[in-house]
Image (cartoon, rainbow, N blue to C red):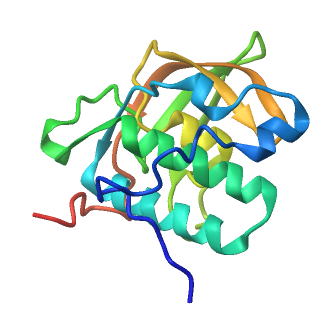
Amino acid sequence: MRRYFDALHPNSGSGFLENDQCAQQRGIGSIADLRPIRAVLTSRDYWCLQEHRRRCEDIDAAMFMRLARLIRAKMEDATVLSCDEITPDTVTGSARVTYLLDQNRPKTRRLYHWGYPDRARNRLPVCTFLGITLIGMSAGQRAKLINANGIAGELQVLAVHSQVSPEAHTCDWLT
């Protein structure tokens, strides 16, 4: 049986970012260097991120453990609000967002947590380094994009076009 640390528990996993072995082995900056990670999450996104983190920890490979650490850092530094309190320019788990990575051409993608609907194009799973970095950011905000090998560049959110996809009409699980 695997013991899961709960991000809501005050004593959970203290010091987990200080010992980022994946970063130390490759001689790159750790996730702790990104802190604080400013994000605003809906309660639904918060709980979905919690499940993504648990699944990454179950895989127990270096890349997925690093992704789990990034998710945990994002959750610990985030402000959690209800859907009604989220501003329209905040990236949620179902938002369509235009972003810029370094000086490349802008890209527009719709984030999703679970299940890839084949009728839609340009989808981006939240449970990727790019998706985790984008979720909770707001238009105009910049952040370093970290991947399995280190810092991949600088990410900027240019615009958030819509918040809720047609198939996901419910927003908060706690209300």
Seen from the viewer's position, the closer of residues 9 and 71 is 9
Residue 104 percent location from the top left of the image: 78, 15
Residue at horizontal 49 percent and vertical 41 percent from the top: 73
Residue at horizontal 73 percent and vertical 69 percent from the top: 60
Residue 93 percent location from the top left of the image: 43, 49
Residue at horizontal 54 percent and vertical 61 percent from the top: 53
Question: Which residue is situated farthest in the left direction here?
Answer: 175
Residue 37 percent location from the top left of the image: 46, 28
Residue 67 percent location from the top left of the image: 66, 50
On the question of residue 99 being in view, the answer is: no
Question: Which residue is situated farthest in the right direction here?
Answer: 26
Residue at horizontal 53 percent and vertical 48 percent from the top: 71
On the question of residue 13 being in view, the answer is: yes
Q: Is residue 166 above or below residue 25?
A: below
Quarter holding the N terminus is: bottom right
- Would residue 39 be found to the left or right of residue 174 on screen? right
Seen from the viewer's position, the closer of residues 11 and 164 is 11
